[in-house]
Image: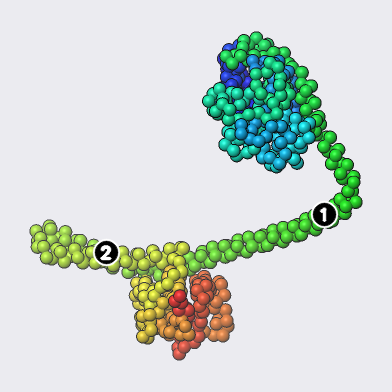
């Protein structure tokens, strides 16, 4: 059978481990008495316990009288039973505050704490602050204004005793009987600390600086099932005394806690402090009104400025994002057009490329058949066979180089812009063109500076430009009837850069054609796409260069200029 989980929040004022050890007997008893229920201890500090109650994440609460009274008013907790401790005079006179100092401290009364450094656990701690705060107020010492320094150090409260013992503060506020328990466990030496302004309470075994208040209750949340609350109440009342001597009894009266809250103006009496604040506002209403008007105007101005800045920032962000989107789209479109241009070049040269590959492949086949005949006739001399094998390897390398050049050129993305030597880049493009168009006669011309010609460029894109210009040149000469005429390719230095020129003998251009040559999709060829020169112009300009066409003798000179590499 699956047991129902019952979560019980416990205020861990001495730490989580101490809480689990202190309440282990109670939880073992409940689990044994109500075996159909699985009771889970949830050790929490004041804020955590208050949040758990507000969120209804627990079913029951074990806490001190002050914390219970606060939650009874705010969240409707109901006390089922009250702890009956062996150290208490009764369940209604059980706990208090001990204001401790070093044994050698020159302090005897609560009034001696004015201007002193005092430690406490928390503003919400019942025994470790609130009870002592009431006694200080009744003695004429305001904890908030008369103490030199009031420091809240949190739990566990044993740390407060050790800090006072070590001289880190003048005094500390702890729960009654804590010092006696720490001495008994050997945590501090006997006589190291003493209680300030001790009260004589007959029968109470511990020193206290305050009157005594009710012990801890076991309380149910407002929405805890009545049948469950009744079963737990009966089980707790039937619990025998624990090894430490504690047991549960009928709910105690908490009138003394109510009086404490009223004297301090906390809990349900916090409105008393609010009334004092209202009186202060009434006395200074004119000045506060002026300040309020100015503050309101300043807030309105700040809100307006913030709105305008936010709106403008958003508009700029949107404009920047749109600009980036358009730029990315343009780059993608340019890349696609460049790839289409390379494919168009290769498509136009496909038959020539196939012819170029066919020659080494045919040679390899012939050599292979020759080796086969030699083997068949038994002529296995080593030297002739080795010569044939070397020739096969050479022809294979020739075919592989041709394929590799075509593959690199056809690669969609191209390379990246980086420093390159311009002469070998152009000559490689000329070689690739020679493979595809063996009938073309390309004449290389240059001057003495070409060996040092270095530019920052994308190698694949620049080769695409050279191949486009060469392809245009051979097509113009073929159309003009002299495909075998020499095509001159030159590299010269010019104005902090270098110019690559392709000069053909395919006739000139008329004025109308020259004006539209760089327009996308404009072509003078029946089967042309009209992308070549437009793409070339875009590529060259993206490298910071220029592309030009002009008539030269019986043909056209197409050239592009690139800036030289800058040396930092």
Question: What residue did someone put label 2 on?
Answer: 396
Residue 294 location, quadrant: bottom right
Q: Tags 2 and 1 in contact by the CB under 8 Å rule?
A: no
Residue 460 location, quadrant: bottom left
Count all numbered tags in the image, as a single digit. Answer: 2
Residue 356, x across and y down, in percent: 32, 69
What residue is at 72 percent from the left and 26 percent from the top?
210
Please tell me which residue lies in front, 304 or 482: 304
Coloring basis for residues: rainbow
Q: Residues within 10 Å of mark 2 (few under 14, many from 20)?
A: some
276 to the left or right of 99: right
Residue 244 visible to an observer of this rendering: yes
Quadrant (top left, top right, bottom left, bottom right) of the C terminus: bottom left
Q: Residues within 10 Å of mark 1 (few under 14, many from 20)?
A: few
Residue 274, x across and y down, in percent: 83, 38
Please tell me which residue lies in front, 30 or 452: 30
Question: What residue did someone put label 1 on?
Answer: 295
Furthest-bottom residue in view?
553
The residues bearing labels 2 and 1 have C-alpha atoms spaced at a distance of: 88 Å
Q: Secondary structure at mark 2?
A: helix
Residue 252, x across and y down, in percent: 74, 17
270 to the left or right of 108: right
Relative height, residue 363 to residue 546 (above, below): above
Point out the tag, 2 or 1, that comes first from the N-terminus: 1
Quadrant (top left, top right, bottom left, bottom right) of the N terminus: top right
């Amino acid at each position: 059978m699956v047991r129902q989980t019952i979560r019980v929040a416990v205020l861990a004022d001495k730490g989580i481990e101490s809480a689990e050890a202190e309440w282990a007997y109670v939880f073992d008893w409940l689990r044994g008495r109500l075996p159909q229920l699985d009771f889970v201890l949830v050790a929490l500090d004041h804020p955590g316990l208050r949040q758990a109650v507000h969120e209804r994440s627990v079913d029951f609460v074990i806490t001190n009288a002050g914390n219970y009274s606060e939650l009874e008013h705010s969240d409707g907790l109901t006390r089922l039973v009250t702890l009956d401790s062996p150290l208490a005079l009764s369940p209604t006179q059980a706990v208090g505050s001990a204001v401790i100092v070093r044994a050698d401290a020159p302090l005897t009364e609560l009034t001696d704490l004015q201007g002193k450094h005092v430690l406490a656990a928390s503003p919400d701690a019942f025994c470790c602050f609130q009870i002592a705060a009431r006694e200080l107020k009744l003695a004429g010492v305001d904890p908030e204004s008369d103490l030199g320094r009031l420091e809240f150090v949190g739990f566990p409260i044993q740390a407060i005793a050790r800090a006072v013992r070590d001289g880190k503060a003048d005094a500390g506020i702890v729960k009654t009987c804590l010092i006696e328990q720490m001495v008994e466990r050997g945590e501090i030496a006997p006589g190291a600390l003493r209680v300030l302004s001790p009260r004589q309470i007959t029968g109470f075994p511990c020193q206290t600086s305050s009157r005594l208040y009710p012990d801890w209750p076991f309380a149910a949340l407002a929405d805890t099932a009545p049948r469950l609350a009744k079963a737990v109440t009966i089980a707790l009342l039937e619990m025998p005394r624990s090894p430490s001597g504690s047991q549960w009894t009928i709910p105690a009266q908490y009138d003394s806690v109510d009086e404490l809250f009223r004297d301090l103006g906390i809990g349900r009496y916090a409105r008393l402090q609010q009334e004092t604040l209202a009186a202060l506002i009434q006395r200074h209403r004119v000045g506060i009104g002026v300040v309020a008007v100015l503050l309101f105007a300043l807030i309105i101005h700040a809100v307006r400025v913030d709105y305008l800045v936010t709106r403008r920032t958003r508009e700029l962000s949107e404009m920047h994002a749109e600009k980036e989107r358009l730029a990315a789209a343009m780059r993608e479109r340019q890349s696609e057009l460049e790839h289409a241009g390379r494919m168009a070049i290769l498509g136009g040269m496909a038959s020539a490329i196939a012819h170029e590959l066919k020659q080494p492949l045919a040679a390899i086949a012939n050599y292979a058949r020759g080796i086969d005949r030699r083997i068949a006739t038994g002529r296995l001399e080593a030297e002739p066979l080795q010569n044939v094998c070397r020739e096969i390897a050479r022809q294979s390398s020739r075919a592989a180089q041709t394929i590799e050049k075509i593959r690199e050129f056809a690669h969609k993305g191209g390379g990246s812009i980086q420093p390159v030597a311009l002469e070998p880049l152009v000559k490689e493009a000329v070689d690739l063109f020679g493979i595809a168009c063996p009938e073309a006669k390309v004449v290389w011309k240059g001057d003495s500076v070409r060996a040092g010609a270095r530019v920052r460029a994308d190698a694949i894109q620049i080769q695409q430009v050279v191949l486009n210009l060469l392809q245009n040149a051979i097509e113009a000469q073929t159309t003009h009837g002299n495909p075998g005429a020499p095509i001159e390719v030159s590299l010269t230095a010019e104005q902090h850069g270098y110019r690559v020129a392709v000069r053909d003998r395919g006739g000139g251009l008329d004025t109308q054609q020259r004006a539209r040559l760089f327009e996308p999709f404009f072509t003078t060829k029946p089967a042309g796409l009209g992308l070549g020169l437009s793409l070339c112009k875009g590529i060259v300009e993206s490298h910071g260069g220029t592309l030009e066409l002009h008539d030269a003798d019986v043909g056209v000179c197409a050239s592009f200029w690139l800036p030289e590499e800058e040396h930092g």
